[in-house]
Image: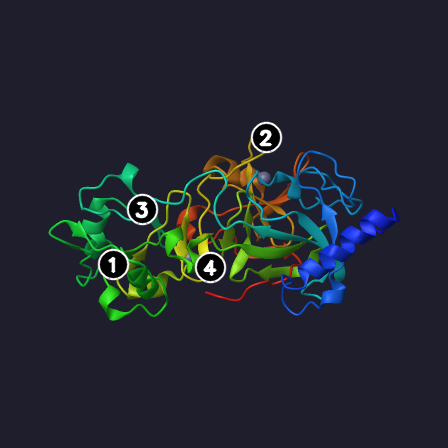
Amino acid sequence: MTRDLRPSALLLVALALAFALVGAACGSQSADSVAGSVVDSTDEPDPTTVVEPADEGAINSDGQASTPVDLFIDGALVDEIVTVDCTLSSGTATSCYQITVAGYPADSDVGPFCPTTTTDTADEVGIWFDGEQLYDLDGQFILDLPEIYGDDNWHLHDDGEVHVTDTPEAFDGAARPDVAEEYQNHCVEGQIAWLDGGEPITSTVQIPVTPIVGDSPSPVGAQIGVTLSGVTIDGPAPVDAILGAYTIAAFDDCGGHLNPVAGYHLHGATGCSEVGEEVDGETRAFGIALDGFAIHSPLAEADLAAAGLDECNGHTTDELGYHYHANSPELNAVLTCLVGESISTRRGR
Ligand SMILES: [Zn+2]
Ligand SMILES: [Zn+2]
């Protein structure tokens, strides 16, 4: 960690942060190891800034891209980003940005999700993807379910009226791996107002200030990263359990949905929350993975071959350095592995 010797004001800030962070620190980190320093996330230079977030594509002395925390959209974060001492999965001690995302997209609304009738059209509803196909969640999809999944037990509607989880109790009973019997054959959706306290669920992650490429890629865990709009990016939705209970855990057009534990979170990259410049043959960034590398939108089919993505869907370009491209949303896997080391911050489903 870079030590800045500007004295007293900085020290006070660091001390105040150390106290403030005691309650918020992740995992087993003890209070005295959380020596914070403020990173200004606005354009205004702040006298207490110690670590200047590098521009996207900035290459450090190891030839790696720096973690592009300057890309977050206004409103995506709760509190300022601070740097803390952290230990990566391999045991490497380094500096991490501690980032708390708002749990609600700063640049769009949440929903819509389920159709209410079997005549609803694509523009009134969200989407569904199951690892193979992406569907508009329109009325016709509801009617076609027995055929799509080859099972006559699907009956998500009565006389054209779609069974939707329309109370907090129904949402709690259906948005879980062991769906209560009475909520089988439901299109599942939730509202922010139904979460604990009626508020978005924030999520705090620690991401290395400088990504460190590990000896071998690591499979992604429950959480892959965060969007630049302030939402958690999760691993695959548990599609087998969802379909096994004759439910559809509807996504909105941005590929996100709610559950009572994680709040609003993303399972598929559909082009929302993109920032940065358009580069030929490229897509723009929409997230940051837990290892610190940017995640860009899926590449167009025509650009895939030339891109030469590695097994974790990443590649290095002159303009952008190393970055990932999300898989197509129908695959229900934004990424399957990370090349860099990270800290696992959350266990879950
Ligand atoms: Zn989910
Ligand atoms: Zn690229």
Q: Are marks 3 and 2 in contact (CB under 8 Å)?
A: no
Numbered disc 2: secondary structure:
loop
Residue at mark 1 to residue at mark 4: CA–CA distance: 20 Å
Displayed-image quarter of ligand 2: top right
- In the image, residue 300 sits, relative to residue 115, either above or below, namely above
Q: Nearer the viewer, residue 219 or 198?
A: 198
Q: Which residue is mark 4?
A: 262
Q: Quadrant of the N terminus?
A: bottom right
Q: Which residue is mark 2?
A: 277
User: Which is in the foreground here, disc 1 or disc 4?
Assistant: 4
The answer to which of marks 4 and 3 sits earlier in the sequence is: 3
Do we see residue 133 in this rendering?
no
The spot of residue 345 in percent (x, y) is: 59, 62
Q: Is residue 23 above or below residue 286?
A: below
Mark 3 vs 2, N-terminal side: 3
Measure the alpha-carbon separation of dots 4 and 2. Answer: 31 Å
| Mark 1 → mark 2, Cα distance in angstroms | 41 Å
Nearer to us of marks 1 and 2 is: 1
Label 1 SS: strand
In this rendering, position of residue 194 left or right of residue 54:
left
